[in-house]
Amino acid sequence: TPSGRLALVWRWPEDEGSAGWQAQVRAKIAPHRGDHPGFVGEQGRDGITRHEGFAPLVHKELRFHQQTTADRYLAALRSYSFIARMNDPERAALIREIAELLPEGDLSIPTRADIWTARRL
């Protein structure tokens, strides 16, 4: 709609200040991620930049700690498209391996959100 806004949001586990288990989890899932566009390159922003109907993208960064439980964390991992599309035995084995890396109790995950907004012209 005229005068509307577009927002693109990417949330990332933050390396700085993260616990050792987080690096181990990233290492476990990295081989399955491949060249997923959410993790490489311009992540689709170029299409908005080229579109004449939007003002230039404005970037903001937000850092916070995501508070969650192991069960919710594992459920979120299962929802990643590159994990969800794995066959059932392979996905289950990966999730079991990751579950063994998680600490006891609630999790506090340093997180960064990259937010790009553009005004509709």
Image: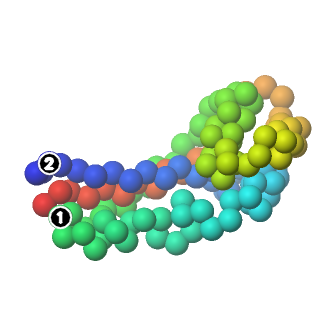
Q: Residue at x 73, y 28 (%)?
A: 71
In the rendered image, the vertical position of residue 70 relative to residue 109, given as above or below: above
Q: Residue at x 78, y 50 (%)?
A: 25
x and y percent of residue 1 in the render? 14, 48
Q: Is residue 75 left or right of residue 50?
A: right
In the rendered structure, which disc, 1 or 2, sits on the residue that comes first in sequence? 2
The residue that mark 1 highlights is 53
Q: Considering the numbered disc 2 on the image, is that residue within a helix, a strand or a loop? A: loop
In the rendered image, the vertical position of residue 106 relative to residue 44, given as above or below: above
Residue 46 visible, this angle: yes
Q: Nearer the viewer, residue 99 or 86?
A: 86
Q: Nearer the viewer, residue 40 or 111?
A: 40
Quadrant position of residue 119: bottom left
How many C-alpha atoms fall within 10 Å of the one at disc 1: few (<14), some, or many (≥20)?
few
Amino acid at dot 2? Thr
Quadrant location of the C terminus in the rendered image: bottom left
In the rendered image, the vertical position of residue 34 relative to residue 18, given as above or below: below
Label 1–label 2 contact, CB within 8 A: no
* Cα–Cα span, label 1 and label 2: 10 Å
Q: Nearer the viewer, residue 24 or 19?
A: 24
Residue 6's disc is: none
Farthest-out residue, front: 87
The residue that mark 2 highlights is 1
x and y percent of residue 4 in the render? 17, 49
Q: Residue at x 42, y 65 (%)?
A: 44
